[in-house]
Image: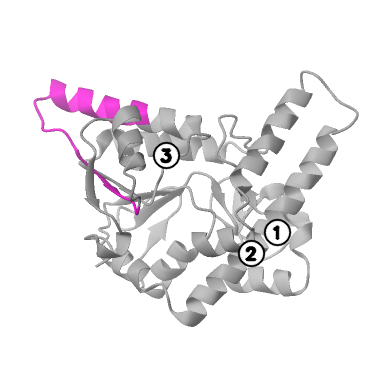
């Protein structure tokens, strides 16, 4: 799906553009400009988010039509109820395959210990802030301030041209993490940190440790170091940390070992060939 998005956007790094808008608004708070006012920045961000959601829906519909998601099905079937999946993706392919395979999951907390926990640290194209409730109905509450549009309702709004009325709740991979008036995402980051601290196994699948996301890098580094420190104090073995990433240069592995921990081990060069995708 990522490749399709890159092709459709002509190799434009959307994260960079969103990061630029994010930084611009933060800078405006200190040194306002008449050329690019904060209101205009927010409007540009809203339009960009709607376009991203629209494109991701196209890619997802295409993937489901051509049934190119078999490896995702194999992945979700290997998960245990005690597993936590942390993702920075905005799309909803993983959730769709969990539902289709009859696998229960929760966005914030486990359902009495029986559901896989799915932490979407950068939001989701089908999430909306509570302020959007006046313009969009039929939402499912996933957090205190964030609500989810069912897939069918999302498609209806898109076909009717009404997505512009309610841009998705997603944030760019920047240090600022503009949370757009919600504390729910902060709680998700804290939860993710605690999960990594307590994890027996940590597997990075397709994650490149983007240099622009210093926030994520700092949180992951601190959590892994705390995990190692706690286990060493208790005389327990270090957690297993693996990387599954189709990177022929090995650059991602070098970055992981440099910024997270030297014990990161490459499992394979392709997710489909790893034990998660086989």
| 50, above or below 40, in the image | below
Q: Secondary structure at mark 1?
A: helix
**Where residue 32 sits in the image (x, y, percent)?**
84, 23
Which numbered marker is on residue 163? none
| Color scheme of the displayed model | one colour
Q: Label 1, on which residue? A: 51
Q: Label 3, on which residue? A: 209
Q: Is residue 176 visible?
A: yes
Q: Label 2, on which residue? A: 55
Residue 24 sits in which quadrant?
top right
Q: Residue at x 49, y 36 (%)?
A: 187
Residue 265 sits in which quadrant?
top left
Give the residues drawn in magenta, as a range: 221-246
Q: Looking at the image, is mark 2 or mark 3 earlier in the sequence?
A: 2
Asked if disc 2 and disc 3 are in contact, CB closer than 8 Å, the reply is no
Asked if disc 2 and disc 1 are in contact, CB closer than 8 Å, the reply is yes
| 37, above or below 94, in the image | above
């Amino acid at each position: 799906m990522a490749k399709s998005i890159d092709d459709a956007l002509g190799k434009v790094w959307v994260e960079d553009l969103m990061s630029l808008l994010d930084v611009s608004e933060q800078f405006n708070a200190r040194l306002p400009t008449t050329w690019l006012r904060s209101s205009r920045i927010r409007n540009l961000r809203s339009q960009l988010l709607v376009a991203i959601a629209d494109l991701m829906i196209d890619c997802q519909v295409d993937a489901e039509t051509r049934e190119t998601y078999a490896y995702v099905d194999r992945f979700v079937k290997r998960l245990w109820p005690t597993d936590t999946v942390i993702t920075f993706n905005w799309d909803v392919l993983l959730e769709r395959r969990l539902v289709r395979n009859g696998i229960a999951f929760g966005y914030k907390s486990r359902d009495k210990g029986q559901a896989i926990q799915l932490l979407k640290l950068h939001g989701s194209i089908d999430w909306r802030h509570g302020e959007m409730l006046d313009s969009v109905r039929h939402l499912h509450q996933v957090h205190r301030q964030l609500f989810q549009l069912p897939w069918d309702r999302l498609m209806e709004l898109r076909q009717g041209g009404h997505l512009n009325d309610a841009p998705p709740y997603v944030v760019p991979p920047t240090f600022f993490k503009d949370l757009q008036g919600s504390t729910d995402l902060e709680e998700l980051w804290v939860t993710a940190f605690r999960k990594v601290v307590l994890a027996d196994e940590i597997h990075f699948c397709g994650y490149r440790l983007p240099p622009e996301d210093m926030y994520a890098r700092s949180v992951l580094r601190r959590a892994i170091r705390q995990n190692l420190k706690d286990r060493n104090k208790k005389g327990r073995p270090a957690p297993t940390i693996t990387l599954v990433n189709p990177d022929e240069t090995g650059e991602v592995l070098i970055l992981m070992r440099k910024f997270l921990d030297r014990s990161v081990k490459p499992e394979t060069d392709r997710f489909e060939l790893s034990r998660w995708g086989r």
